[in-house]
Image (cartoon, rainbow, N blue to C red):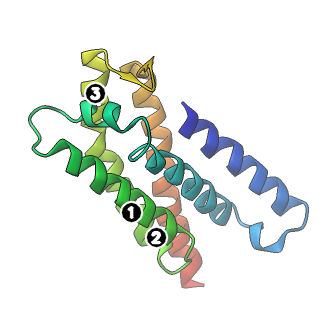
Amino acid sequence: MAPLLVLVVSFVLLLGLGRLGVRHLGSWVVCLRYALAAMFLLTASAHWGSRRADLVAMVPPALPYPELLVTATGVLEIAGAAALLVPRLAPWAAAGLTVLLVAMFPANVHAARAGLTLGGSPVTPLVPRTLIQIVFLAATVAVAIGARRRNRR
């Protein structure tokens, strides 16, 4: 739930700053790019912190090398977040992060079905987690499309 909160709150704050005259934040696409970057940096931080073991446990048993997968997805989230900050790379980063979200979703399904915990709390149940995932996907797709159009101008 924290990633959704970071995404929404940072997006609204950045939009507000844009409306108050911060010229660089005058576009919703730019604001959403930055909000997504903040969200992915937050989620990436869990890949090496005290929640790492919980993330490793979330990897479906059919997949090999769960620790390596958690490390790789964390690195990809950081790289994607950084690339979102570069206008020319943003559409590609958003598209890549879209694919990453889809690829990681089975871990959320496994965690919900297995009744796992994250940071000592039960993981978000599957239906709310799916709805949250749809919000994240909508944001990455919106940036992929919006940033590409913006770069063509």
| Residue corresponding to mark 1 | 95
Q: Is residue 127 left or right of residue 84?
A: left
Q: Quadrant of residue 149?
A: bottom right
Three-letter residue code for mark 2 = Pro
Q: Nearer the viewer, residue 123 or 146?
A: 123
Q: Nearer the viewer, residue 14 or 66?
A: 66
Label pair 3/1, CB-CB below 8 angstroms: no
How far is the residue under mark 2 from the one under mark 1? 6 Å
Label pair 2/3, CB-CB below 8 angstroms: no
Secondary structure under badge 3? helix
| Residue corresponding to mark 2 | 91
| Residue corresponding to mark 3 | 109
Mark with earlier residue (3, 1): 1
How far is the residue under mark 3 from the one under mark 1? 22 Å
| Quadrant in which the N terminus is drawn | top right
Three-letter residue code for mark 1 = Ala
